[in-house]
Image (cartoon, rainbow, N blue to C red):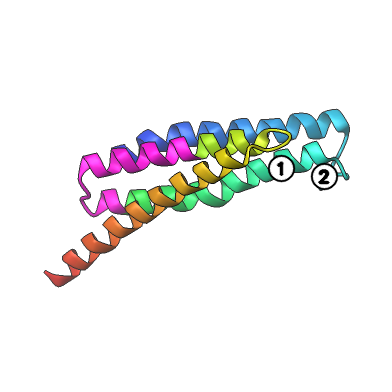
Amino acid sequence: MPYTALFALPLALLYLALALRVIGLRRGRRVEIGDGGDRELLRRMRVHANAAEYIPLALIVLGLAESLGAPAALLVVSGLILLAGRLIHAYGLAQEPNILRLRIAGMVLTMISIVTSATAAFVLAIGHLAT
């Protein structure tokens, strides 16, 4: 699944960068578990957690669409929309105060990507089952 792999790498790097931001602050503030009442740590944890909540599902449905023979253009556009959405959302949420319009735009792009890939996978699966 080369198209899914093409987007899995930058999304994995984004995920790791967000994790390292949490780890670095956690170590610096000596907070072993939870957020220790630190708002900045809580914000970084939520930015990271949000990525963990959406990236796996998005890559799964992208991979399913690819494995069922979705057109390359659809896969590339959906992957680019996903990557842009995750970057925009992470940046907007990481700011203090957060930039709501970027958070919303990032989530809308993420949802568009998931719906696009999932719909393509569903339609293609129905087609395969009908034959």
Considering only order in the chain, which callout, 1 or 2, is on the residue closer to the N terminus?
A: 2
Quadrant assignment, res 40: top right
Residue furthest to the left:
131
Confirm whether the magenta stretch covers residue 82: yes
Residue at image coords 39%, 40%:
81
Question: Do the CB atoms of the residues marked 2 and 1 lie less than 8 Å apart?
Answer: yes
Q: How many C-alpha atoms fall within 10 Å of the one at disc 1: few (<14), some, or many (≥20)? A: many
CA–CA distance between discs 2 and 1?
8 Å
The location of residue 85, given as percent across then percent down, is 47, 40
Query: Identity of the amino acid at label 2?
Result: Asp
| Other residues around mark 2 within 10 Å, as few (<14) / some (14–19) / many (≥20) | some
Q: Which residue is mark 1?
A: 45
Q: Is residue 43 above or below residue 70?
A: above
Q: Which residues are magenta?
A: 65-85
Q: Amino acid at mark 1?
A: Met
Q: Is residue 27 visible?
A: yes
The residue drawn where x is 53% and y is 31% is: 13
Judge whether 73 appears above or below 116 on screen: above
Q: Is residue 88 left or right of residue 9?
A: right
Residue 22: image x %, image y %?
A: 72, 35
Q: Secondary structure at mark 2?
A: loop
Horizontal side of residue 46 vs 89, given as left or right: right
Residue under the point 68% across and 38% down: 98
Q: Which residue is at 33% across, 52% downward?
A: 116
Whether residue 112 is in magenta: the answer is no
Q: Is residue 101 above or below residue 56?
A: above
Whether residue 1 can be seen here: no
